[in-house]
Amino acid sequence: MTGRPGPRDVGETLVELLVTVVILGIATSGLSAALLATVNASNLHRQEALARHSLRAWAEQIGVGAYTACAAPSSFAAPSPALPSGLTAAVASVSYWDGTSFASSCGSDTGVQKVTLRITARNGLSPPRNQDVEVVVRKPCVSSC
């Protein structure tokens, strides 16, 4: 054998192959992390959109419902149909129109109430997020207003 390598003896060394495998592993783990972050962001966005839709549907349900004089938060019906898992609904507050502004206590009912509806979205990855909407509920006029 001569000291010079022939055409069949040229190739990659073990170190070069290991460096290539490490580089490919790092690139794959980076892409996997980016894909996981995209999936999590998509799930959060879907849950928030679902919460907004449920909140608007509940507000419409409250707006067309029967008027109750000096209604307490418990007087308003829960959202229908039932909320998906991870969402909870509550009436945050009810304010009553006193002729000049909304007050937190009902003196004499003037036929106008402001109801604050809240839907809380919970998932295990982030703190709970609240979405609120205010609905003005009016007593219907029967003869003259």
Image: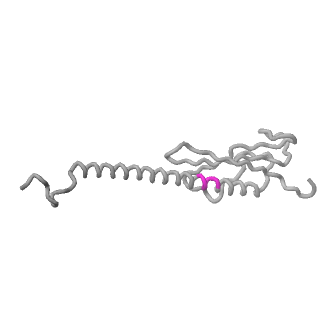
Position of 54 compared to 13: left or right? right
Residue range corresponding to the magenta coloring: 48-52
Query: Main SS of the magenta segment?
Result: helix
- How many labels sit on residues? 0
**Quadrant location, the N terminus:** bottom left
Q: Quadrant of residue 84?
A: bottom right
The image shows residue 37 at horizontal and vertical percentages of 47, 50
**Coloring applied to the structure:** one colour
Position of 131 compared to 5: left or right? right
Residue drawn at (76%, 58%), measured in percent from left and top?
A: 64
Residue drawn at (57%, 53%), measured in percent from left and top?
A: 45
The image shows residue 125 at horizontal and vertical percentages of 49, 46
In the displayed structure, would residue 84 be above or below residue 96?
Answer: below
Camera-nearest residue between 129 and 65: 129
Residue drawn at (59%, 45%), measured in percent from left and top?
A: 129
Camera-nearest residue between 50 and 102: 50
Camera-nearest residue between 19 and 6: 6
The image shows residue 13 at horizontal and vertical percentages of 20, 51
In the displayed structure, would residue 103 be above or below residue 49?
Answer: above
Camera-nearest residue between 51 and 64: 51
Residue 92 sits inside the magenta stretch:
no
Residue drawn at (62%, 45%), measured in percent from left and top?
A: 130
Position of 82 compared to 63: left or right? left
Toward the right, the furthest residue is 144
In the displayed structure, would residue 101 be above or below residue 27?
Answer: above
The image shows residue 12 at horizontal and vertical percentages of 22, 54
Position of 9 compared to 85: left or right? left
